[in-house]
Image (cartoon, rainbow, N blue to C red):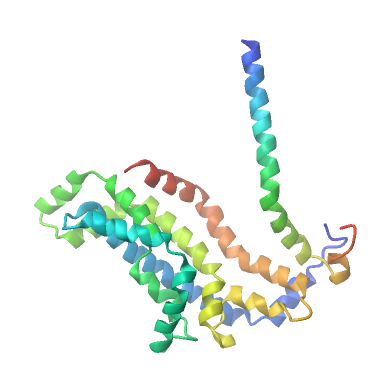
């Protein structure tokens, strides 16, 4: 019984990790757009390391 | 990744550089008229396919649906030639008039919804003396509100964010839409990324608001129309 609940939680945890990882691919360009719009100029936009 | 200091001057500068009002007016005209056109034409066609009985109805519906498989880019050149022959190049018309001739995707979406409405309502209205058009706008159209709202939201987002259509058909700057106007920040040798991104953020706001307001409706509307056949 306890093992079943444990597995259920584990499955949910993995699902969330997978969803968060996938969502990064969609959020990153949007985040880049917003942060770049608040930067001062080319030097700050193309600075390395970012 | 994150700025050292938040520089909101980019937004102020963009507002000075960009002829916002002209572009906004053009975007609003195209978005509004194409949304009205899509709702009007697609709902009428969907109603006919869902409720009326006529010869070769299903074959005709299949034909309409099959147009979804033709990529937009393959019909682009003939469409351009057609519009240039009737003198519509460099006007807003090619961007909203076709919406009044329906969209296969929305016809399908609305047909599925109309099919879920009990046929008894159609027959009861007919007995009460309604003609076919009255049945449509007095009974079916109000009942299909969730699906209609989904269509409005999807079309708004598509028309507002369209870059390719305006790029092909519009030439003079006073006809540009907001999204096409963003291109002005891109130069041949130099791009002002901070201004371009500030302008993009501002242009995205209406779509974002519409999406956030209608988020539940979009998902709900598509789920409803997908579930019932």
Q: Is residue B81 left or right of residue B64?
A: right
Q: Residue furthest top?
A: A1
Query: Is any part of residue B25 visible from this angle?
Result: no
Looking at the rendered structure, the number of numbered marks drawn on it comes to 0
Nearer to the camera, A44 or B168: B168
Against B123, residue B198 (above or below) is below
Picture layout, residue A11 above or below residue B201: above
Q: Quadrant of the C terminus of chain B?
A: top left
**Along the viewing direction, whichever of B203 and B87 lies nearer the viewer:** B87
**Which quadrant is the N terminus of chain B positioned in?**
bottom right
Left or right of residue B112: residue A23? right
Q: Is residue B3 left or right of residue B150?
A: right
Quarter of image, res B137: bottom left
The residue under the point 41% across, 60% down is B68
Horizontal side of B119 relative to B204 (left or right) equals left
A6 or B130: which is nearer to us? A6
- Residue B100 at x, y = what percent? 35, 71
x 25%, y 56%: residue: B59
Pick whichever, A29 or B63, lies toward us.
Answer: B63
Residue at 21%, 52% (x, y): give it. B51
Q: Quadrant of residue B142?
A: bottom left
Residue at left offset 14%, top offset 58%: B130
Q: Can the viewer see residue B20? A: yes
Residue B15 screen position, x and y as percent:
69, 77
Task: Give percent across and percent down for residue B117.
Answer: 27, 46
Whole-percent x, y for residue B96 in the image: 43, 74
């Amino acid at each position: 019984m306890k093992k079943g609940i444990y597995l259920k939680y584990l499955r949910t945890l993995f699902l969330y990790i997978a969803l968060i990882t996938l969502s990064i691919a969609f959020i990153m360009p949007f985040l880049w757009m917003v942060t770049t719009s608040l930067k001062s100029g080319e030097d700050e936009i193309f600075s390395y390391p970012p | 990744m994150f700025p050292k200091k938040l520089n909101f001057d980019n937004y102020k500068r963009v507002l000075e550089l960009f002829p916002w009002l002209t572009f906004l007016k053009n975007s609003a005209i195209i978005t509004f008229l194409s949304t009205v056109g899509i709702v009007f034409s697609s709902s009428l066609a969907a109603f006919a396919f869902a409720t009326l009985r006529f010869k070769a109805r299903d074959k005709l519906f299949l034909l309409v649906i099959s147009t979804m498989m033709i990529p937009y880019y393959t019909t682009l050149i003939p469409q351009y030639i057609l519009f240039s022959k009737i003198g519509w190049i460099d006007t807003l018309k090619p961007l909203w008039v076709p919406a009044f001739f329906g969209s296969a995707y929305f016809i399908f979406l609305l047909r599925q919804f109309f099919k879920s409405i009990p046929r008894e309502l159609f027959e009861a209205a007919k007995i009460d003396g309604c003609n076919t058009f009255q049945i449509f706008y007095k009974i079916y159209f109000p009942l299909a509100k969730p699906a209609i709202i989904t269509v409005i939201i999807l079309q708004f987002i598509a028309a507002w964010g369209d870059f390719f259509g305006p790029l092909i058909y519009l030439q003079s700057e006073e006809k540009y839409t907001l999204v096409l106007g963003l291109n002005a920040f891109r130069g041949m040798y130099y791009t002002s990324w901070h201004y371009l991104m500030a302008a993009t953020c501002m242009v995205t706001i209406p779509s974002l608001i519409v999406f956030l307001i209608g988020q539940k409706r979009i998902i709900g509307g598509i789920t409803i129309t997908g579930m019932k056949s």
